Image (cartoon, grey):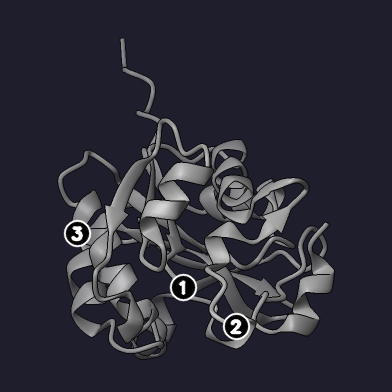
Amino acid sequence: MAQPPKEPIVAGLLLAAGGGRRLGGRPKALLEHRGRPLVEHAVRVLREGGCGPVHVVLGASADRVRERADLSGCVLVDNPEWEEGMGSSLRAGLESLAATAADAALVSLVDQPGIGAAAVARVRASYRSPDSLTAAAYGGERGHPVLFGAHRWKDIAASATGDRGARSYLKAHEGALSLVECGDVAQAYDIDTAEDLAHLE
């Protein structure tokens, strides 16, 4: 009898290393949301959206984040070069996933609490093969989360520099990129400035 197709392993990769420079140096992972550190909320969203294992890249105040946030069950990845920008965190996270059996990585950002499990599940469901390349879209504009099939990790890591993350890779591979509209289930704002803190509960 034919075996049913294996459920793909889509790991969650949470980039949570930012130092919150425009927030007066308050690490974004530790901003409070619903009474708990923002990083806990972001991990829960990945899990509820069907991702596992979950790897969390820490940078600014990593020791304090470990002390204050409940990240049990997550693989914590230190990025000593976090001040170089998001690219270094993406590289560190993909490197940590290379030793796993994951078929794809679903990458999310800690400072986007308006993106919940429904958007994560929608992007996760787009997985087709280790060559998959998908991003959430909001009104047709590319955003997060993004899904990278495992075959693409090496090239994405090689192109991830500064604060651009995977932007240059995605631009160069636009023809292969699938967009999944999520504007009806999520809001893609960032928590970057003091004004943005109004989004937190």
* Residue at image location 52% in from the left, 54% down from the top: 126
Residue occupied by mark 2 = 24
Nearer the observer, 157 or 178: 157
Report the side of 152 relative to 37 (left or right): left
Q: Are marks 3 and 2 in contact (CB under 8 Å)?
A: no
| Badge 1 amino acid | Gly
Report the side of 91 relative to 187 (left or right): left
Question: Considering the image in quadrants, where does the N terminus appear?
Answer: top left
Locate residue 11, reporting x and y percent. 39, 45
Residue occupied by mark 3 = 95
Nearer the observer, 53 or 119: 53
Asked whether the viewer can see residue 146, the reply is yes
| Badge 3 amino acid | Glu
Q: Which of marks 1 and 2 is in front?
A: 2
Report the side of 98 relative to 187 (left or right): left
| Badge 2 amino acid | Gly
